[in-house]
């Protein structure tokens, strides 16, 4: 069933500076968005992982069980089919099915941001419309990279203008209707200190409640407590991102009672030495 949705696309997934404007276009969108409506992005977003079976198939039931547990955490919403979800390894049909299942499983007041980027402009337009029809509130569109040398400014302007009809993000945004989301739990406190409104944090898959607590402490101006909490999150965050990546994230999820499970090939599980180091990064900071 077609649904009208507001679609927006940041130019960066890591640090998402989002400017929004209602759109009333696209196949399958039954009615334009109401003029003047806005998406409020304040809060913590968890970029969901995709559980797989031992045979490498998407395990929807485990994804729904994770979402059931996340219902106790005051997230603003979820990012689906970003890098944490191993989206490059999923087929277009699998990507849309995951978004649809997540939308059905979470309350309507939770925002759903869906990764719809493809290498071609045509593919990205089709995927973005498909994500809207599957229930996404917004689209995250990454820059095409396969033909990197051909991705000139003119090519990228054309690419993004065909998808979202948004103007380019301008350098100075103080007079614009802008919200900034920090792209890492490692510097969430710093982001709030300079005016960010929230974050898309991989570590939220594991330590969602502490990250939401950090958000609350910053909002209340309790900076000393926020600083102490932030320091405890830096090493675990680094471990599941730049140090060991998605295999470490999924392993940590298992330790905390979520369904992490295997990654889809060619990603490989951690070695015994890496497992020990990952456990140490969490335990010495008081999380295990």
Image (cartoon, rainbow, N blue to C red):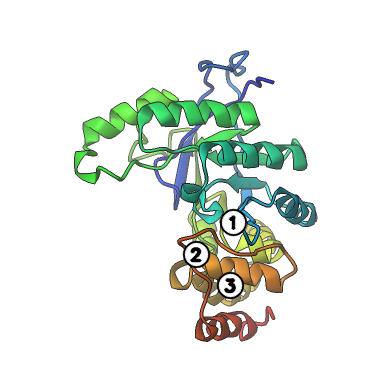
Residue 139 against residue 43 in the figure, above or below:
above
Closer to us: 163 or 95: 95
To which quarter of the image does residue 98 belong?
top right
In the rendering, at what x and y percent does residue 20 appear? 50, 31
Query: Which dot marks residue 56?
Result: 1
Select label 1 or label 2 by which is in front.
Answer: 1
Closer to us: 228 or 79: 79
Quarter of the figure that contains the C terminus: bottom right
To which quarter of the image does residue 49 belong?
bottom right
Look at mark 3 in the image and give the residue it sits on: 233
Residue for point 30% across, 27% down: 158
* Circle 1: element type: loop
In the rendering, at what x and y percent does residue 59 appear? 68, 52
Residue at far top of view:
31
In the rendering, at what x and y percent does residue 217 appear? 67, 63
Neighbour class for label 3 at 10 Å: few (<14), some, many (≥20)? many
> In whole angstroms, how far apart are the C-alphas of marks 2 and 3?
9 Å
| Mark 2 or mark 3: whose residue is earlier in sequence | 2
Residue for point 56% across, 49% down: 197
Look at mark 2 in the image and give the residue it sits on: 187
Residue 205 against residue 4 in the figure, above or below:
below
> In whole angstroms, how far apart are the C-alphas of marks 3 and 1?
31 Å
């Amino acid at each position: 069933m077609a649904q009208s949705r507001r679609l927006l696309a940041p130019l960066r997934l890591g640090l998402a500076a989002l400017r929004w404007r209602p759109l009333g276009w696209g196949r399958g969108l039954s009615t334009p968005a109401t003029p003047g409506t806005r998406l409020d992005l304040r809060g913590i977003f968890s970029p969901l992982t995709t559980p797989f079976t031992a045979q490498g198939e998407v395990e929807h039931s485990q994804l729904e069980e994770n979402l059931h547990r996340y219902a106790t955490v005051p997230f603003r919403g979820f990012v689906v089919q970003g890098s944490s979800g191993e989206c490059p390894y999923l087929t277009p049909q699998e990507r849309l099915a995951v978004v649809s299942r997540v939308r059905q499983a979470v309350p309507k007041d939770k925002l759903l941001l869906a990764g719809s980027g493809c290498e071609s402009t045509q593919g990205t337009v089709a995927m973005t419309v498909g994500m809207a029809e599957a229930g996404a509130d917004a689209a995250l569109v990454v820059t095409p990279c396969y033909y990197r040398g051909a991705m000139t400014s003119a090519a990228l302007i054309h690419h993004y203008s065909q998808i979202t009809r948004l103007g380019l993000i301008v350098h100075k945004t103080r007079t614009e209707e802008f919200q900034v989301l920090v792209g890492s739990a490692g510097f969430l406190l710093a982001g709030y200190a300079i005016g960010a409104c929230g974050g898309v944090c991989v570590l939220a898959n594991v330590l969602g409640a502490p990250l939401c607590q950090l958000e609350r402490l910053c909002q209340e101006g309790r900076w000393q407590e926020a600083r102490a909490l932030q320091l405890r999150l830096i090493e675990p965050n680094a471990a599941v991102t730049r140090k060991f990546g998605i295999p470490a994230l999924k392993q940590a999820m298992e330790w905390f009672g979520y369904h992490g499970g295997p990654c889809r090939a060619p990603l490989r599980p951690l070695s015994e030495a890496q497992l020990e180091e990952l456990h140490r990064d969490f335990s010495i900071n008081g999380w295990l």
